[in-house]
Image: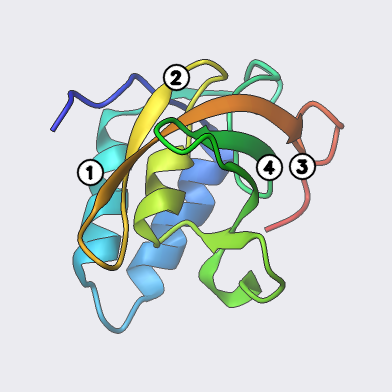
Amino acid sequence: MSSAPSITITRLDLQRLEQMLDDLDDFGPGAEALQAELDRAEVVGHDEVPAGVVTMNSRVHCREISSGKDYNLTLVYPHEVGPEGTVSVLAPVGTALLGLSVGQEIDWPTPSGKVLKLSLLAVDYQPEAAGEYTRS
């Protein structure tokens, strides 16, 4: 597996995600993977995060490299998953997207065990860039 790209998260996202992890009844592999990402992230203030970085509630456009298939995803907390295109931060692709910058690539392990390579093409919406800090 390729080495993980550097990631940046906001202090507010870090606090909310750590609280969510503390509240989990079942601290499974998804929670462990997220905790590992939080532990290695560069943490910045919500007003310091670059616009091309994936934060919680960001809408992103990525492409699966080998097939060229495009994905438009919104990174959400587990209780907000619902409409197609939302992905939980506890899902492997959600954990991998958190803190990623435009132009970086991630490995996306699919439920079937296959690993796809995704490239982050754009952050179409980022709450911090839009001045929205209150969503949890």
Q: Amino acid at mark 1?
A: Ala
11 vs 45: above or below: below
Residue at (30, 67) in percent of width and height: 111
**Gap between marks 3 and 2 measured at Cα:** 25 Å
SS under mark 3: loop
Which residue is tagged 4?
Answer: 58
Instruction: Answer with the quarter of the image where residue 96 lies.
Output: top left
Q: Is residue 66 left or right of residue 56?
A: left
Say if 82 sits above or below 71 in the image.
below
Nearer to us: label 3 or label 1:
1
Residue tagged 2: 104
Q: Earlier in the sequence, mark 3 or mark 1?
A: 1
- Of discs 2 and 4, which sits in the foreground? 2
Earlier sequence position, callout 3 versus callout 2 = 2
Residue that numbered label 3 is attached to = 133
- Please say if the residues under marks 4 and 1 sit with CB atoms less than 8 Å apart: no
Q: Are marks 2 and 4 in contact (CB under 8 Å)?
A: no
> Amino acid type of disc 4?
Ser
Asked which secondary structure carries label 4, the reply is loop
